[in-house]
């Protein structure tokens, strides 16, 4: 997309504004990722802090609608409409275009455009390659709305392939121990499995029941994950030397102690902070994130060439400050209700949402 003619007939807040329910577009009477039930909702992706049940009408990508149906049942909304990435949908005099965000399968940014003003709400996003979903596409815009889950200079994510290599090296060194990898059930778990396969690992991968439905959906969408087996259908005593994927909360449960001499791993951007890993009893921290790290947040802000940046959730202050030093107008939106399921801060216990 190229930037529209810069002749904004709207003041930005007339086209999109933060409300306690989420971002709201008055001329179309529609919310983006509302945290409470609304008449009409646009949903960026299936994580439970963005995709909630009970809206009147929902517009989202085909994959996101399918994920919501898997989690909440077919009647999760009064009506559903598929948004095809790259195709604008007009509501009143506003055009809405879904564009891949690279976060999880089906995830999208939403470009909101009217009278020559374009605002892009990026939802959650990352820039690192992910074999399980379409890559982020930068959209030039007047105002870019970004998350800041890892919006501090300390957060620099190493390549995920190297982290998976650490896991496989540990499996090689400790062939009698079960490696239990905590990974959020939508997106991270499947990405970790896909990366393990890319690294050439061919043994079955064992999963916790909470990961099963979404994993089956990824496979049905044509993402090869190799042979997957359910822990529940296996004698755990035989799982020494094997890899088990489960929701992060399960690594803390009795459930995780019933394997032969388990090694507890956790795949999250938070694992960059060693104290977090220690506090959670994580023996093998794997810094694998589905969110942009500090460098990628800055690179993305530069790339979209917006004159103004709005920061939704996460570490807004540092990012807003950086924008100021770069000569960009920026403000935090202080949206509440988004503590991403996909990368909730384990220290704050939000991670439990992942067992949905
Ligand atoms: Zn989120
Ligand atoms: Zn998310």
Image (spheres, rainbow, N blue to C red):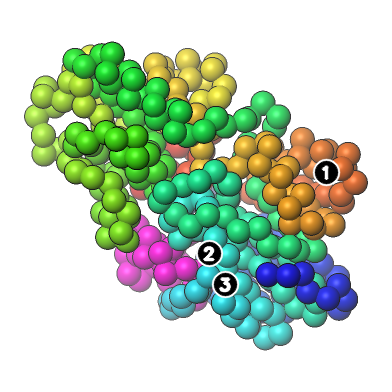
Residue in front for this viewpoint, 211 or 153? 153
The earlier-in-sequence mark between 3 and 2 is 2
Image check: 203 left or right of 37?
Answer: left
Kindly identify the residue that appears in the image at 50 percent across and 29 percent down: 287
Disc 1 element: helix
Looking at the image, is 209 positioned above or below residue 120? above
Cα distance between the residues tagged 3 and 2? 15 Å
The earlier-in-sequence mark between 1 and 2 is 2
Q: What residue range appears in magenta?
A: 50-77
Looking at the image, is 77 positioned above or below residue 320? below
User: Which percent across, then down, holds residue 219?
Assistant: 28, 55
Instruction: Say if disc 2 is inside 8 Å of ligand 2.
Output: no
Of all residues shown, which one is farthest toward the bottom? 92
Q: On the image, which quarter does residue 89 sit in?
A: bottom right
Residue in front for this viewpoint, 24 or 331? 331
The earlier-in-sequence mark between 1 and 3 is 3
**Which is closer to the viewer, label 1 or label 3?**
3
Count of numbered tags: 3
**Which is closer to the viewer, label 1 or label 2?**
1
Crowd around label 3: few <14 · some 14–19 · many ≥20 (10 Å): some
Residue corresponding to mark 3? 86
Residue 43: which numbered mark, if any?
2
**Which is closer to the viewer, label 3 or label 2?**
3
Cα distance between the residues tagged 1 and 2? 27 Å
Disc 3 element: loop
Cα distance between the residues tagged 1 and 3? 28 Å
């Amino acid at each position: 997309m190229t930037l529209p003619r810069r002749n904004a007939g709207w003041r930005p807040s007339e086209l999109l504004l933060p409300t306690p329910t989420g971002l709201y577009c008055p001329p179309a009477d529609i919310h983006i990722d509302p945290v409470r039930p609304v008449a009409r909702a646009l949903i960026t992706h299936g994580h439970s802090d963005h995709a909630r049940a009970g809206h009147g009408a929902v517009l989202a990508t085909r994959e996101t609608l399918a994920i919501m149906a898997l989690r909440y049942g077919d009647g999760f909304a009064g009506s559903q409409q598929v948004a095809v990435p790259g195709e604008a949908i007009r509501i009143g005099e506003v055009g809405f275009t879904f564009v891949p965000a690279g976060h999880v399968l089906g995830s999208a940014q939403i470009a909101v455009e009217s009278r020559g003003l374009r605002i892009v709400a990026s939802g959650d996003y990352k820039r690192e390659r992910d074999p399980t979903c379409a890559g982020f596409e930068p959209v030039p815009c007047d105002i870019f709305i970004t998350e800041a889950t890892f919006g501090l200079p300390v957060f620099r994510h190493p390549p995920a392939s190297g982290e998976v290599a650490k896991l496989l090296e540990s499996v090689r060194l400790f062939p009698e121990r079960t490696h239990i990898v905590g990974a959020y059930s939508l997106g991270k778990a499947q990405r970790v499995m896909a990366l393990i396969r890319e690294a050439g690992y061919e043994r079955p991968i064992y999963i916790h029941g909470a990961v099963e439905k979404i994993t089956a959906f990824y496979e049905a969408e044509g993402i090869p994950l190799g042979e997957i087996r359910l822990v529940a259908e296996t004698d755990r005593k035989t799982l020494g030397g094997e890899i088990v994927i489960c929701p992060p909360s399960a690594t803390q449960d009795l459930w995780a102690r019933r394997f032969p001499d388990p090694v507890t791993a956790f795949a999250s951007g938070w694992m960059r902070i060693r104290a977090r890993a220690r506090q959670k009893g994580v023996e093998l921290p794997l810094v694998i994130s589905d969110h942009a790290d500090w460098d990628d947040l800055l690179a993305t802000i530069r790339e979209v060439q917006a004159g103004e940046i709005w920061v939704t959730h996460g570490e807004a202050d540092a990012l807003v400050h950086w924008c100021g030093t770069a000569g960009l107008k920026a403000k935090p939106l202080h949206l509440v209700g988004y503590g991403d399921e996909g990368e909730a801060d384990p220290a704050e216990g939000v991670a439990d949402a992942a067992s949905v």
